[in-house]
Amino acid sequence: MGRPKGTTKPVDIEAVENLAAIGCTQDEIAVVMKVSTKTLQRRKDVHEAIDRGGARLRSSLRRWQYNKAKDGNVAMLIWLGKQLLGQRERIDQEIREETVIIEPIPKSGTDA
């Protein structure tokens, strides 16, 4: 028999958000919270906490990347330029056209 209608298993929303903020998947969060993944997916408050945690993670990563770029990390400067500014490496390609004439081989009078 399941839980009485209208009741939900308690879930620590702050802990869910913090787990999402370090990159945990919904399956991992469910294990730590001792609930099913379906419980997490069903509850709007949990889903919003996961979204907030994911946003915190992404903003932290951007900040760390930005700081690395400011410190002179050339690879990070190039990567951020491509991601945020639409910059790309220019590849020059030379297109060469040639005309090839194929002439038939004249038949000789003897078969080999």
Image (cartoon, helix red, strand yellow):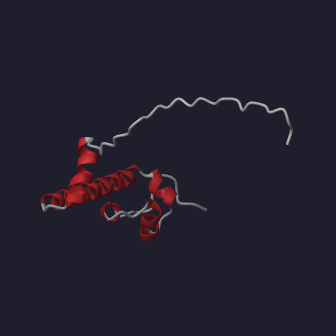
Q: Residue at x 85, y 36 (%)?
A: 110
Residue 4, image x and y in percent? 52, 57
Name the residue at the front extreme: 109
Work out whether residue 34 or residue 2 is closer to the camera in this orientation and state it.
34
**Residue at the location (26% across, 43% down)?**
87
Q: Is residue 82 left or right of residue 25?
A: left
Residue 14 in which image quadrant: bottom left
Q: Nearer the viewer, residue 13 or 63?
A: 63
Residue 100 image point, x, y percent: 56, 31
Q: Relative to residue 111, is residue 19 depicted above or below?
A: below
Residue 33 can be seen, yes or no: yes
Q: Looking at the figure, which quarter contains the N terminus?
A: bottom right
Count of picture labels: 0
Q: Nearer the viewer, residue 53 or 15?
A: 53
Which residue is drawn at the image coordinates 24% and 52% (left, top)?
78
Outermost residue toward the right? 111
Quadrant holding the C terminus: top right
Q: Is residue 76 left or right of residue 46?
A: left
From where the camera sits, is residue 60 visible? no
* Left or right: 111 as drawn, with respect to 103: right
Q: Position of residue 24 (x, y in %)?
A: 39, 64
* Residue 56 spot, x, y in % from top left: 26, 56
Of residues 25 and 66, which is closer to you in this image?
A: 66
**Residue 61 falls in which quadrant of the image?**
bottom left
